[in-house]
Image (cartoon, rainbow, N blue to C red):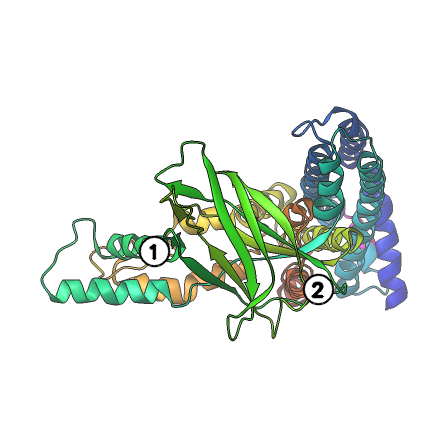
Amino acid sequence: MIRNIVAVARLTFAEGIRMRILLVVVLVLAFITLRLPFTVRGDETVAGQLQTFLSYSLGAVSLLLGLATVFLSCATLTGDVKNCTIHLVLTKPVSRFEVLAGKWLGINVLMLLLVALCTAAIYGFATVIKNRPVAFARDRVVIRDVVWRARVGAKPKPPVDLHKEARQWVENQLKQGQEFARGFDAAIAARVKELETQWRKIAPGHFAIYVFENLIPPREAGAKIQVRYRARGQPTPIDEMLAIDFAFADPETFQPIGAIYSTRERINEWHQFLADGRGVIRNGKAALLVGNPLPPDKRTAIFFDQDEWLELLYNIGSFEENYLKTVLLIIGRLSFLAALGLFFSVFTSFPVACFCVLTVYMLCLGMPWWEEAIGARLEYRSDQFDLYGRFGPFVRLFLFPLMRLACPDFSTYDGIERLVAGHYIPVPLLLKGLAHTLGYGAMLLFLPGWLIFLRREIAEVTV
């Protein structure tokens, strides 16, 4: 059995190498990989050039090899049926399961080889860019501690469920006879925004405690923690400079730990500083005291009103580890597309199989957008306003989860953005991504795909 699978895989591998479209893809990837290191500018810093190069080059590898996988997987089996080559194969002691397994293995090996060559070249050029001379010492620090790292980022969690609190408040207002012109859901959203504003506001002379949960302890002893924040003042200071004091605290008792970090930075811009991380994370939690100092001549309140406003970042891994995980996620995506192409090729012709796979591919690439477009995350108070009428609860309970299962969300299982930002790719996310792409593709190919192929009359015409 294994010998037959390997034989079919070898033939599929050789067939893929001879395909002109694969040659075109390889030439385009070679041009992009060799050209980008000398043309990218980013924000005119070496760190910006490195991030731009990684984003564009790895994105091109994922997209172009994905398209090549679609055409190769759809062409190999349908071409054998059209040219009657499959008749010669099946007359030998080779089962249809072995044909599917061998073709899937051959495509995966070919794509694995191409991904390995491309990503090795990209890593080499990224190393060259990283070691370029820098104009500012801070640029070197950003490369070392931000880009060429695998950091965990954490955001503060509200002390209560704001959505639940807002819903209760709106329902109480409705019982008292108040009406909301924009509707129930809009009233809840507005109340949540109001509660968030109150939580993120620090009056002059006061301080707030922001708690971070589900943290992973740093691997390095004495590791530094990077605090990133963006705030504004009300009223706006004349010099547009805002003074803020930071200090870590025990997450249980909220007693201060270590030194106080006093900052004075421009409003509405991202700022960051490194803090001593020893003893800060306890039982997966950390607490940050944020104070608004009260000079005699100032009465400015601190507002954190942007979506991205406060974050803790600390290193728990290496860039190389993150890079390998990103490559594995790309391989899982290509393996899923290969299985999907072979699955549709079992009972359709080449054009139809390509159309079906490309449609699923587009759904997977834009899953968050599609969910928003069809109202997957909306809640309605009555069937009168529901997009799906009285079937709305059923649709959201069964059909939407089924759609998420059938079409893996490639934006979720994409490590490129995390890699470029220096954010750690968690192992559970990697395993979930591989299970939902590679594992799901194998299940789809070897269960319904094999059963359909087993019962199909090869000599019949397909449309």
In the picture of the structure, the residue carrying the numbered disc 2 is 218
Give the percent coordinates (x, y) of residue 284: 60, 71
Compare residues 359 and 329 and report the one nearer the observer. 329
Specify the farthest residue to the left.
Answer: 177
Mark 2 residue crowding within 10 angstroms, few (<14) / some (14–19) / many (20+): some
Label at residue 198: 1
Give the percent coordinates (x, y) of residue 318: 78, 55
Q: Secondary structure at mark 1?
A: helix
Total number of numbered labels? 2
Q: What range is drawn magenta here?
A: 83-88
Quick check: can you spot residue 8?
yes
Give the percent coordinates (x, y) of residue 102: 81, 58
Compare residues 227 and 455 and report the one nearer the observer. 227
Rendered view: 248 above or below 19: below
Residue ID at (84%, 56%): 8
Give the percent coordinates (x, y) of residue 125: 83, 36
Residue ID at (79%, 63%): 98
Residue ID at (20%, 49%): 182
